[in-house]
């Protein structure tokens, strides 16, 4: 069943600490979540997913048998589980640990401890994924849009495609880095580009510079969806001519608004 409200959302909480699990469940219940299960490690969580099929998995980073990164990638590599939404709650701040989770496509990453408003916002973002609002474009139909998606992470591309599809955009051509995107831009017309920053061969900044300076589609809107946190790098991307920058993980409403703004003048 597709949940229409938090009361209909089915959550699997993966948390080895009983006090932490009790605290998070208390916050979930206060937010309006009524249906939930709890698992203490990754393997039992995966078994529970196959048995009960939750709408959302909320996990800590460090589990007895694997990390939260391992868990979400196990889900993304399992055909039966790859579409289940994932949220991380962790005190971990190291880029090496957090970035793989961002790349896997998650609805939110919350700190430990988190504020109740942060949890509610993350839960409502998950609901938005199930119950998306259509794009509001005066001159264009979402189903007619053609998008070039450039990201070296297959899991990230799959997540972004899912979000685009929820907005009515199904015509998405993929490239695994900037160098692969260049010939596609010469062969086909696109309404806009969605690109990552960190990619091999040609990164997002170099791709934007190529599009703006050397491509036959020099004025095409470009949305960067990235986990890049270096402000100097992001400033250079803005200087190169990006139309908008969105963090990973992102909220569906944010992506919708940015796409609408980018396409408003077309």
Image (cartoon, grey):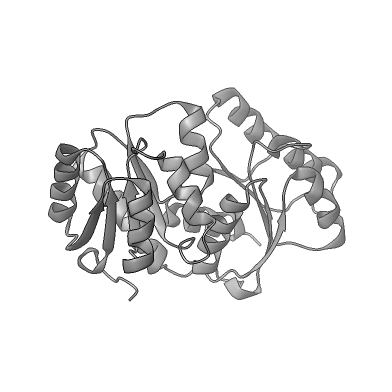
Q: Position of residue 18 (x, y in %)?
A: 17, 40
Q: Nearer the viewer, residue 49 or 4?
A: 49
Looking at the image, can residue 105 be seen? no
Q: Height in image: 209 above or below 159?
A: above
Residue located 32% across and 45% down the image: 41
Position of 55 with respect to 177 (left or right) is left
Q: Of all residues shown, which one is farthest toward the top?
A: 232
Where is residue 257? Give x, y as percent: 48, 56
Report whether 10 appears left or right of 235.
left
Q: Quadrant of the N terminus?
A: bottom left
Q: Nearer the viewer, residue 13 or 149?
A: 13
For residue 4, side relative to residue 195 (left or right): left
For the point 57% across and 52% down, which residue is it? Answer: 155
Compared to residue 123, the image places residue 69 above or below, namely: above
In this rendering, does residue 19 appear at all? yes
Q: Residue at x 36, y 59 (%)?
A: 47
Q: Residue at x 34, y 38 (%)?
A: 63
In-front residue for pair 132/63: 63
Q: In the image, residue 150 lies at what x, y percent? A: 69, 50
Is residue 200 shown left or right of residue 253?
A: right
In this orientation, which residue lies closer to the viewer: 43 or 194?
A: 43
Quadrant in which the C terminus is drawn: bottom right
The percent position of residue 117, horizontal first and vertical second, equals 22, 45
């Amino acid at each position: 069943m597709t949940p229409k409200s938090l009361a209909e959302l089915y959550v699997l909480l993966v948390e080895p600490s009983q006090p932490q699990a009790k605290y998070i469940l208390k916050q979930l219940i206060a937010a309006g979540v009524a249906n939930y299960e709890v698992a203490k490690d990754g393997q039992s969580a995966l078994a529970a997913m196959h048995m009960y099929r939750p709408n959302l998995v909320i996990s800590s980073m460090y589990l007895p048998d694997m990390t939260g990164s391992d868990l979400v990638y196990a889900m993304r590599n399992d055909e039966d589980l790859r579409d289940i939404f994932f949220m991380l709650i962790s005190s971990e701040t190291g880029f090496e640990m957090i970035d793989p989770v961002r790349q896997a496509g998650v609805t939110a990453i919350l700190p430990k401890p988190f504020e109740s408003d942060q949890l509610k916002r993350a839960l409502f973002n998950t609901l938005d994924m199930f119950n998306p609002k259509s794009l509001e474009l005066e001159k264009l139909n979402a189903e007619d849009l053609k998008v070039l998606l450039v990201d070296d992470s297959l899991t990230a591309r799959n997540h972004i495609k899912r979000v685009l599809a929820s907005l009515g955009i199904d015509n998405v051509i993929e490239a695994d880095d900037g160098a692969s995107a260049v010939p596609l831009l010469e062969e086909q017309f696109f309404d806009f580009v969605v690109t990552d920053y960190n990619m091999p061969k040609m990164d997002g900044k170099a791709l934007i510079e190529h599009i703006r300076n050397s491509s036959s589609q020099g004025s095409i809107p470009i949305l960067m969806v990235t986990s890049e946190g270096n402000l100097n790098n992001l400033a250079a991307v803005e200087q190169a001519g990006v139309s908008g920058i969105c963090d990973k993980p992102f909220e569906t409403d944010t992506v919708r608004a940015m796409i609408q703004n980018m396409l408003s003048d077309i």
